Image (spheres, rainbow, N blue to C red):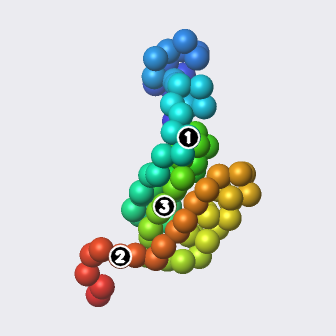
Amino acid sequence: MCPDALGISGASSPSLIDPSSRFLLDGKVVLITGTSVGLGRHFAATFAQVGAHVVFTARRIDPLRVLVESIQAAGGKALGAVRYSGQWD
């Protein structure tokens, strides 16, 4: 959703934070589950952009492989593992 649609005007709003300048995790390790799609995938890429070493899991290997490769191609550190903590049907 566009920030203007939310009534937020411009970069001066406290809701619009540039993570690269205010949120650095250089050398920290972040573990994220459920990174195939959606928020998990977004957070994995975002944490990698701010310097974190990202370890993430998902049920499907192909999306994990793509995410690991894209983070590493951008100079980040990432490790993906297939894992499912629910019940298989």
Residue tagged 2: 84
Q: Is residue 6 left or right of residue 65?
A: left
> Disc 3 versus disc 2: distance between alpha carbons?
15 Å
Quadrant (top left/top right/bottom left/bottom right) for the C terminus: bottom left
Type of amino acid under label 1: Asp
Dot placed on the residue nearer the N-terminal end, 2 or 1: 1
User: How far across and down, in percent of the image, does residue 19 sit?
Assistant: 55, 31
User: How far across and down, in percent of the image, does residue 54 sit?
Assistant: 52, 55
* Disc 2 element: loop
How many marks are shown on the rendered structure? 3
Kindly indicate whether the residue at mark 1 contacts the one at mark 2 (C-beta within 8 angstroms).
no
Nearer to us of marks 3 and 2 is 3
Kindly indicate whether the residue at mark 2 contacts the one at mark 3 (C-beta within 8 angstroms).
no
Q: Nearer the viewer, residue 48 or 84?
A: 48
Type of amino acid under label 3: Val
Residue 7 against residue 86 in the figure, above or below: above
Q: Who's the residue at 60% across and 31% down the image?
A: 20
Residue 66 sits in quarter: bottom right
In this view, which residue lies farthest toward the top? Answer: 12
Residue tagged 1: 26
Residue tagged 3: 55
